[in-house]
Image (cartoon, grey):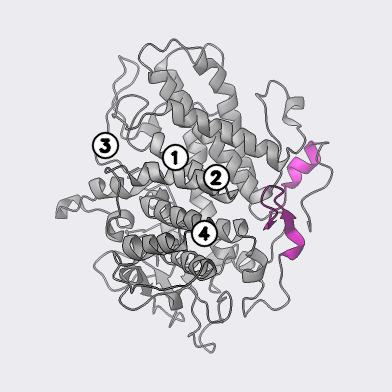
Amino acid sequence: MKKNIIVSVLIGTMLSSCDNWLELDTIGQKVEENYITDLRSAVSAYNGVDKSFTNLWNEMPTVLEAMCDDAFIPKVADANEIIPIDRLEIDFQTANNFYSTCYMGIARINTALPYIESLKDDKGQVAVVRGQMHFMRAFFYFTLVRLYGEVPLMPKINSIEETKQPRATWEQLYEEIENDLVQATKLLPEKLDGSLGQEIGKPYRYSAYALMADFYAYFEKWDEVIRLTDLILANPDFGKVAYKSIFHGEDALNGEDYSALYNKEVLLDANFGEYGKQSFTWEFTPRGYVPGKEQGYHRGIIYATTSSLNPNVTEKPSCGKPGDALLELFEPSDERFKYFWTDTYHETEGLTGTLKYNASTMAYNGGYLNFPVYRYSEMLLLKAEALNEKGEFTQALKIVNEDIRQFMNASVLTANDKSQVQSIIRDERRRELCFECKRFFDLNRWGIMADYLESQDNLAGKNITPHLVENSITKKKVFVFAFPLKEMNANPYIKENNPGY
């Protein structure tokens, strides 16, 4: 969640004021037994884990959006590393960093958590840190499962040999993630009070409900999705707000402070701080764009798909299934359409970038916006999906129309059966959550990744079918990236990579 003020934390004589809770002394390497001795050192250990979390979101949105049918990458020098991904030229090096980043976070948790559990906890403050650790371990394993399929479960590491573990099954990974999420919901507070360990921006109980709902949706446990989303939707602290409050930078001098509205919609975000530590706004937003000016001095590398480009001006981009490009899903009256912007710089006539992340971004790793991971609006759509899957399609469509579309000044949609409502919900997720790193995971959990990506009209002969595996719980065919070669070479239990690599 967004910080509406800069919090200063004073811990005796050990800390002076901090501009950001992430700036507490993070424990990112080996944690010595005599280091975690109190709440402050436990919080520092968690902050090291959170560093892995934010690092993951700095790169993952660009890679996963580029691969899917909402975005395409123009032929510009700054996009050289991403262009092959947009063309589905996926190899063993693609997304390697995500694997190591997740396991780094897991290793930090496994090392610190036993010491945190042994601390005296008179007021329940240490329990909150324990809950944050369980939350993050669930998140990292869930991310690994969705990207790589069956991966190793890692114990606390005391030796090099213990880093070598066999793949766990889908069922074992499901159980591990579920157990951590149950612990997180028990230990995390309903609200953050701003005290040490409960700084605004850290996970709390409703963050765990959101992650848990997403987890159960991935594995098609629809009753649980409804139960968890109901807990969030019934809380008056949350609600739908205008896009500007979520994705636009603030200007305190002009009286722009969106914090109250932001915290009403955003259940969890990746906290990059006010001083510029991420690159996704540099990549998604035309470079150098400043609110109030007509255009930036440089173009971004992520553009929305459309079928109306002039092929004489630029390479025809991927459009998903023919006639199903992202921009063509919006009605002109839809408020969300305002958050796309036509970049007319140089040879990009007709290309439509996004101003969803609308903030001044003057340099790579110079973006200061946080990345929204879970929002109230997604919980509405998850509940609608779950209701529809259980046959309650009339109630599901009512949520889409009354809680999402009418709020955005879009027309009311009609449907006569479950199949039609399913299509409406899936399209609405594209409109509402585009460029929020959701489309890749959606196409995968629905088992339609290959159908949609291989049908893109500029990708003749390209395919991801060789990289599909079966999710043994849902029986859906899902795309998986390759294990890093370093992992393959070091781990004798993993003798074969994922299919097709």
Q: Which residues are magenta?
A: 464-491
- Residue linked to disc 1: 209
Front-lying residue, 483 or 223: 223
- Residue linked to disc 3: 6
Q: What label sits on residue 284 in the rendered view?
A: none
Q: CA distance from mark 4 to mark 3?
A: 47 Å
Query: Which element type, helix, strand or loop, lies under badge 4?
Result: loop
Q: Earlier in the sequence, mark 4 or mark 1?
A: 1
Crowding near the residue tagged with mark 3, few <14, some 14–19, many ≥20 C-alpha atoms within 10 Å: some
Please name the amino acid that badge 1 sits on: Tyr
Q: Residue at x 29, y 50 (%)?
A: 239
Q: Earlier in the sequence, mark 3 or mark 2?
A: 3
Q: Residue at x 63, y 64 (%)?
A: 449
State which mark lies toward you, 4 or 2: 4
State which mark lies toward you, 4 or 1: 4
Q: Is residue 481 left or right of residue 141?
A: right
Q: Is residue 173 left or right of residue 377?
A: right
Q: Position of residue 129 (x, y in %)?
A: 44, 25
Crowding near the residue tagged with mark 4, few <14, some 14–19, many ≥20 C-alpha atoms within 10 Å: some
Q: CA distance from mark 4 to mark 1?
A: 23 Å
